[in-house]
Image (cartoon, helix red, strand yellow):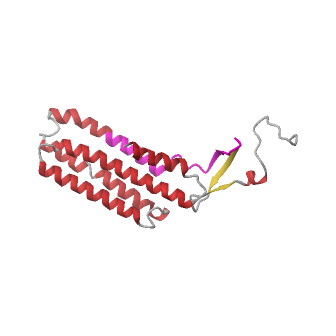
Amino acid sequence: MTVCMLCSVGYHLFSCHRSEKTCRRWMALDYAGISIGILGCYVSGVFYAFYCNNYWRQVYLITVLAMILAVFFAQIHPNYLTQQWQRLRSIIFCSVSGYGVIPTLHWVWLNGGIGAPIVQDFAPRVVVMYVIALLAFLFYISKVPESSDVILVASVDGELIPRVRQKSSTVWKETEQHRRGPIRRAGAVGADGR
């Protein structure tokens, strides 16, 4: 799970890189990390929930593995990371995440319904997991913090440089203010006395 989070951290850290190719590679790693994280949640949950029922455990594990492999194969497509496929990406990840409701409801039914003590012990934890997943999805579709148009980036000499995201790509460009000259911090005096 740590590797999945590191892929996401890498994407969010290097998405301001000048090379669009680098940005897309990190974005692909971020999506791969999300897919592996979803797979990790399913495998452990399905394995233990259906531990005594080998048939259903195999059915659900194979189905989830097939869905994640389909996501990986979709990620190979050259248009997958484009803006036009953003809706499709959201649908794919919602479908894979939403599929988990089916084994959960089946597990509740096999254990005697909502009134069973084991269901009352574990169902709230599953609900919390889905609430957290819903919050993560809301962050994903709202593009927080990537939706910010202007950010301040520290240069090598410590100067804060405003960068503006271009609407057509993930490459950053310098603002007009920075092109006119260095930005002075409040109260700072440059070598020319201004």
On the question of residue 72 being in view, the answer is yes
Q: Quadrant of the C terminus?
A: top right
Task: Tell me the quarter of the picture where residue 2 sits.
Answer: top left
Q: Which residues are magenta?
A: 129-158
Q: Kindly give the residue lying farthest to the right in the view shown.
A: 193
In terms of depth relative to the viewer, which is nearer, 189 or 126?
189
User: Position of 146 compared to 6: left or right?
Assistant: right
Task: Tell me the quarter of the picture where residue 17 sits.
Answer: bottom right
Q: Is residue 56 magenta?
A: no
At x 15%, y 43%, the residue is 51
Residue 112 spot, x, y in % from top left: 11, 40
At x 27%, y 52%, the residue is 99
In terms of depth relative to the viewer, which is nearer, 114 or 72?
72
Residue 185, compared with residue 88, is above or below; it is above
Residue 6 spot, x, y in % from top left: 45, 45
Residue 33, compared with residue 20, is above or below; it is above
At x 40%, y 56%, the residue is 90
Tag count: 0
Q: Kindly give the residue lying farthest to the bottom in the view shown.
A: 78
Residue 16 spot, x, y in % from top left: 58, 52
In terms of depth relative to the viewer, which is nearer, 46 or 25?
25
User: Position of 108 compared to 180: left or right?
Assistant: left
User: Position of 94 compared to 102: left or right?
Assistant: right
Q: Quadrant of the N terminus?
A: top left
Residue 143 spot, x, y in % from top left: 50, 50
Task: Tell me the quarter of the picture where residue 120 sits.
Answer: top left
On the question of residue 146 being in view, the answer is no
Q: Is residue 147 magenta?
A: yes
At x 23%, y 35%, the residue is 122
